[in-house]
Amino acid sequence: RQRQMCIRDRAYIDVARGFVIILMLIGHANAPDPLVKAIFGFHMPFFFILSGFLYNKTKWSELGFKKFTVSKFKAYIVPYFILAFFNLLINIPIEQIKGLKGQELFDSTMNHLQWIFYSWGAIDKMPNCTPLWFLPCMFICCICFYFLNKINNTAVQTVICILSVTLDYILYLFINIQLPWHINVALIGMTFMFIGLKIKESNLSLIHISEPTRLLSIS
């Protein structure tokens, strides 16, 4: 019965994740500004919290850092570069249609290429694929989260998360520049992942929530 409940709970999580993905697509599709602000206010924290909730602490502790890194690299970085380069190739004829050619077209393509490696999610830097910034950011976030979980003291972990959020805020105030692979955002993401993991560890399982409210609670 426990296994059946876990499978059912996972199904609710998948439905909630799909729902938020649809909202994310709406947010990137020129929706009304109030709706966009509402969606963007929670959809990224949701994915970070969900990643922490689904994190298998025992599994990755046994397999070790190398296998964890390889797994996350394949999951996030490989798709990122494949999709980014594909979009870059698509953008070349688009810019030709706009009138760019020769050295000007070459310079523009190289400029986009360097920002793909930097992973700066802005339309003028990563053409047609700005949402892909989340993948390298998630990779960095997972690496940070792995080391956070090597600390067997919740109080220390909490302090580290608070300091991470504080550092991100200081960087925003005094530097106001996006770091490579959105490292600054990953600091916030690590904190949300920590929250997700603690929700799971505190036995706030979906099996204790009435069925009509499960989907809403996950979302």
Image: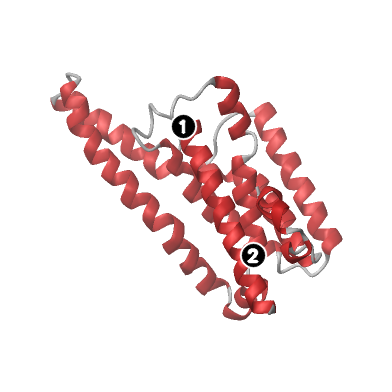
Task: Count every numbered label the image shows and give the total.
Answer: 2
**Residue 146 appears at what percent x and percent y?**
64, 64
For residue 144, say whether it is visible: no
Q: Tell me which amino acid carries mark 1.
A: His
**Residue 81 appears at what percent x and percent y?**
35, 50
Q: Tell me which amino acid carries mark 2.
A: Asp
Mark 1 Cα-neighbour bin, 10 Å: few <14, some 14–19, many ≥20: few
Is 201 placed left or right of 123 in the picture? right
Q: Nearer the viewer, residue 154 or 109?
A: 154
Image point (17%, 19%), residue name: 99
What secondary structure is found at the residue carrying circle 2? helix
**Residue 172 appears at what percent x and percent y?**
66, 31
Is 10 placed left or right of 163 in the picture? left
Image point (69%, 27%), residue name: 173
Image mark for residue 117: none
* Residue 8, image quadrant: bottom right
Lower sequence index among marks 1 and 2: 2
Q: Note whether 24 is above or below 56 in the view shown.
A: above
Image mark for residue 28: 1
**Residue farthest to the right?**
155
Image point (22%, 40%), residue name: 89
**Residue farthest to the front?**
212
Q: Nearer the viewer, residue 43 or 102?
A: 43
Q: Which residue is mark 2?
A: 9
Image point (51%, 66%), residue name: 69
Mark 2 Cα-neighbour bin, 10 Å: few <14, some 14–19, many ≥20: some
**Residue farthest to the left?**
102
Is 106 placed left or right of 123 in the picture? left
